Amino acid sequence: MLMDTIISTMSETMQQMRGEGLFLTTKAEKTNTMIIGWGGINVYFRRPIFIVPVRLSRYTHELMEASTHFTVSVPRPGELSKAIAFCGSKSGRDYDKFAECGLTPVPGRESEVPVIGECVLHYECEIIYKQHMDKDKLKPDIDSEVYPNSVYHSFYFGQINACYSQS
Ligand SMILES: Cc1cc2nc3c(=O)[nH]c(=O)nc-3n(C[C@H](O)[C@H](O)[C@H](O)COP(=O)(O)O)c2cc1C
């Protein structure tokens, strides 16, 4: 049942990820959100998984390391452009992005991490595996193209415990 719901949302979610991006929300010492344009929905360990890549430099990385859950919220195409620009360029170390952008943190159903009220679709995820990138295993031309400053990603595998629309 959950898997069917997830499958029915995948196309919309991946289109939006390729487009303006998705909100990745975390909560530890602070609630914060940033934009992701990479990652996606997969099946591993017999479970539906949302993989999110977060560079070591992000405040979100600190919060993910201190937390067990995250959420991904999908905006409607063409909406929330200002919030996306802000959350995709400013750091939660310096701003309360929810207040700055007028975003509403709506309590999650499965964890304490909120979803974003202004978005149309939400995934609530529990981190069940993470992998910090090993530069030596990366094809050299991708290393120089994507990581000229050697700021690598950690990949967080979040078991999707809930997936729902809210408009
Ligand atoms: C369209 C778009 C896609 C992005 N995708 C990613 C991503 O997949 N992983 C990542 O670490 N940063 C990504 N970023 C950059 C972060 O959203 C940005 O650095 C943000 O300010 C980090 O916020 P934080 O310091 O509060 O965590 C993306 C930004 C934009 C605009």
Image (cartoon, grey):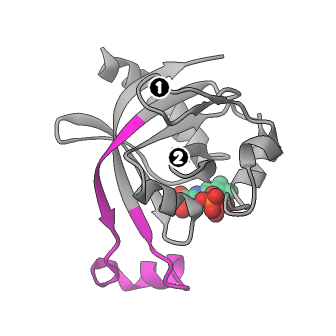
Tag 1: amino acid: Thr
Q: Is residue 15 left or right of residue 76?
A: left
Q: Position of residue 105 (x, y in %)?
A: 65, 32
Task: Say if 161 sits above or below 66 in the image.
Answer: above
Q: Who comes first in sequence, dot 1 or dot 2?
A: 1
User: Which residue in the protein does label 2 denote?
Assistant: 26
Task: Say if 144 sits above or below 47 in the image.
Answer: below
Residues packed near mark 1 inside 10 Å, few (<14), some (14 to 19) or many (20 plus) = some
Q: Residue at x 70, y 33 (%)?
A: 77
Where on the image, by quarter, is ligand 1? bottom right
Q: Residue at x 40, y 64 (%)?
A: 154
| Mark 2 Cβ and ligand 1 under 8 Å apart | yes
Screen quadrant of the N terminus:
top left
Q: Residue furthest left?
A: 46
Q: Label for residue 9?
A: 1
Q: Position of residue 110 (x, y in %)?
A: 41, 26
Screen quadrant of the C terminus:
top right
* Residue 146 magenta: yes
Q: Residue at x 38, y 59 (%)?
A: 155
Between 41 and 132, the one lying in front of the other is 132
* Residue 63 magenta: no
Secondary-structure class at tag 1: helix
Circle nearer the viewer, 1 or 2: 2
Q: Is residue 106 left or right of residue 145?
A: right
Between 125 and 65, the one lying in front of the other is 65
Q: Which residues are magenta?
A: 125-154
